[in-house]
C-alpha cells in the first residue's frame, strides 16, 4: 500500500515514523522548510525511552504527481484548506483519506472537495508534540488510530488500512461507528482544552485549586450534553475516563490547544470549540463554560492575527 502522510508534525510524524519503521511504503507531504529540516536532521522520535531517527521519504506539493492508496491527513484545522489543495494530485479513485484531526467539521470540508467515496472517518489517540528541533516527542503511551467508513458499513479497504496500521504496532480497533468515536474524542479534547485554557495551566495545576476539579466535571457535562443531543451519547466508561483525566491531581497533561495558547501561536479554537458551541446553539443545549473558553481563545486568536 502506498501511503502519503500529509504533515510531518506531532501526529503525522509519529504515525508516519511507525509505518516507515515497519518497512512500509510511506512518503511525507511536507512544505519546503520542513523538508529542508528533515533532510538535514532526519525524522527523530523521542520520549518514553525511545530515540529513533529515520531518513524519511519526502515530497513537496509541486512534485506530487500520482495517486496514493492511503492518505493520512495530519495537519491542524487552520492549515486544512491549503493542505487539501496541495494533496489533490495524490487523490485518485482508489485513494482512501483518513483524517486524524480533532473535531468533525473537516469531514464535510473533505467530502465536499474529494467526494464521499474517498473519505473515511479517523480518530488519533496519541500524545505527542514537537520540540525546539522539530523532533517528535511522545509524552504518553497510547498509539491508536480508529478508522471506518462514514456510513458504518464494513469494507475491504478499511480492513486493509487497519492491517497496515496494526503491522506498524499502531492499535486500530474495529468500529461500526467511527463518526461516534470522532464525537467522543471531540468531547474529550474540548473538555480538556476548555479546562486548561480557562484555568491557564495543566490539569494538575487546575485541579490543585478550589473549584478546579468541579470546573472539569461541569465542562464535561456541557460537552457530553451536546454530543448526546447530536445523537452521539458518550458511553459511560469514556465519560468516567474523561472525568478522571481532566480532574487528576498532579497531572502534567496539557492539550495542544493550551500549548499553542501559552506559546502565543494560533489555535484550533474555531474547529474544536467554536464548532461545538455552534452545534450546541442549534440543538438548544446551554454551554456557558464552553462559551467562555471559546470567547477567551477568540480574543487570543484576534490578537495573534493582528500581531499585537
Ligand atoms: N498532538 C497530539 O498529541 C494530537 C493532535 N491531534 C490533532 O491532530 C492534528 C494535527 O496536530 P499536530 O500534529 O499536533 O500539529 P503539528 O502542528 O505538530 O503538525 C502539523 C503539521 O502539518 C504541517 N502542514 C501544515 N500545512 C501543510 C501542508 N499544506 N502541507 C504539508 N504539511 C503541512 C505543518 O508543517 P509546517 O512545519 O510546514 O508548518 C506541521 O508539521 C490537529 O487537528 C490536532 O488537534 C489529535 C490527537 C493528538
Ligand atoms: C489527546 C491530546 C490531548 C494529546 O495531546 C490531543 O488530542 C491534543 O493535544 O490535541
Image: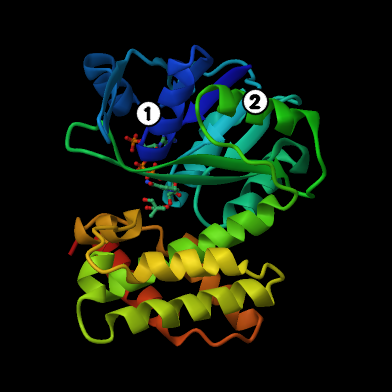
Query: The residue tagged with tag 2: helix, strand or loop?
Result: helix
- The residue labelled by disc 1 is 31
Question: Observer-nearest residue: 308 or 255?
Answer: 255
Query: The residue tagged with tag 1: helix, strand or loop?
Result: loop
Which quadrant of the structure image shows residue 308?
Answer: bottom left
Residue 79 left/right relative to 157 = left
Please tell me which of labels 1 and 2 falls first in the chain.
Answer: 1
Picture residue at 37% right of the left edge, 28% below the top: 31
Disc 2 within 8 angstroms of ligand 1 (CB): no
Q: Is residue 201 visible?
A: no
* Colouring style: rainbow
Q: In the rendered view, would you say 231 is above or below 212?
A: above
Picture residue at 33% right of the left edge, 22% below the top: 35
Residue 146 in the image: x percent, y percent? Answer: 60, 43
Residue 227 left/right relative to 132 = right
Label 1, label 2: how many angstroms apart (C-alpha)? Answer: 29 Å
How crowded is the residue under tag 2: few (<14 C-alpha within 10 Å), some, or many (20+)?
A: some
Disc 1 within 8 angstroms of ligand 1 (CB): yes
Residue 28 left/right relative to 209 = right
Picture residue at 61% right of the left edge, 68% below the top: 234
Residue 39 in the image: x percent, y percent? Answer: 28, 15
Which circle marks residue 163 in the picture? 2
Amino acid at each position: 500500500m502506498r501511503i502519503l502522510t500529509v504533515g510531518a508534525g506531532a501526529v503525522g510524524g509519529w504515525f508516519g515514523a511507525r509505518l516507515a519503521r515497519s518497512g512500509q511504503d510511506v512518503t511525507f507531504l511536507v512544505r519546503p522548510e520542513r523538508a529542508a529540516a528533515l533532510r538535514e536532521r532526519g525524522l527523530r522520535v523521542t520520549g518514553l525511552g525511545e530515540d529513533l531517527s529515520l531518513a524519511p521519504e519526502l515530497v513537496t506539493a509541486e512534485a506530487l504527481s500520482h495517486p496514493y492508496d492511503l492518505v493520512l491527513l495530519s495537519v491542524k484545522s487552520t492549515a486544512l484548506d491549503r493542505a487539501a489543495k496541495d494533496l489533490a494530485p495524490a487523490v485518485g479513485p482508489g485513494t482512501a483519506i483518513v483524517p486524524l484531526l480533532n473535531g468533525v467539521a473537516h469531514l464535510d470540508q473533505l467530502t465536499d472537495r474529494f467526494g464521499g467515496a474517498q473519505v473515511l472517518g479517523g480518530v488519533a489517540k496519541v500524545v505527542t508534540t514537537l520540540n525546539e528541533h522539530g523532533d517528535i516527542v511522545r509524552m504518553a503511551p497510547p498509539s491508536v488510530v480508529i478508522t471506518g467508513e462514514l456510513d458504518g458499513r464494513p469494507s475491504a479497504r478499511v480492513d486493509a488500512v487497519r492491517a497496515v496500521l496494526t503491522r506498524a504496532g499502531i492499535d486500530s480497533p474495529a468500529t461500526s461507528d467511527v463518526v461516534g468515536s470522532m464525537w467522543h474524542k471531540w468531547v474529550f479534547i474540548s473538555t480538556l482544552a476548555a479546562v486548561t485554557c480557562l484555568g491557564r495551566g495543566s490539569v494538575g495545576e487546575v485541579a490543585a485549586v478550589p473549584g478546579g476539579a468541579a470546573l472539569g466535571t461541569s465542562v464535561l457535562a456541557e460537552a457530553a450534553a451536546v454530543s448526546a443531543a447530536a445523537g452521539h451519547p458518550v458511553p459511560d466508561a469514556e465519560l468516567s475516563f474523561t472525568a478522571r483525566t481532566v480532574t487528576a491531581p498532579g497531572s502534567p497533561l496539557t492539550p495542544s490547544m493550551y500549548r499553542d495558547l501559552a506559546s502565543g501561536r494560533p489555535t484550533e479554537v474555531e474547529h474544536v470549540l467554536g464548532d461545538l458551541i455552534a452545534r450546541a446553539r442549534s440543538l438548544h443545549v446551554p454551554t456557558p463554560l464552553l462559551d467562555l473558553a471559546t470567547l477567551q481563545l477568540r480574543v487570543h486568536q484576534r490578537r495573534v492575527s493582528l500581531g499585537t
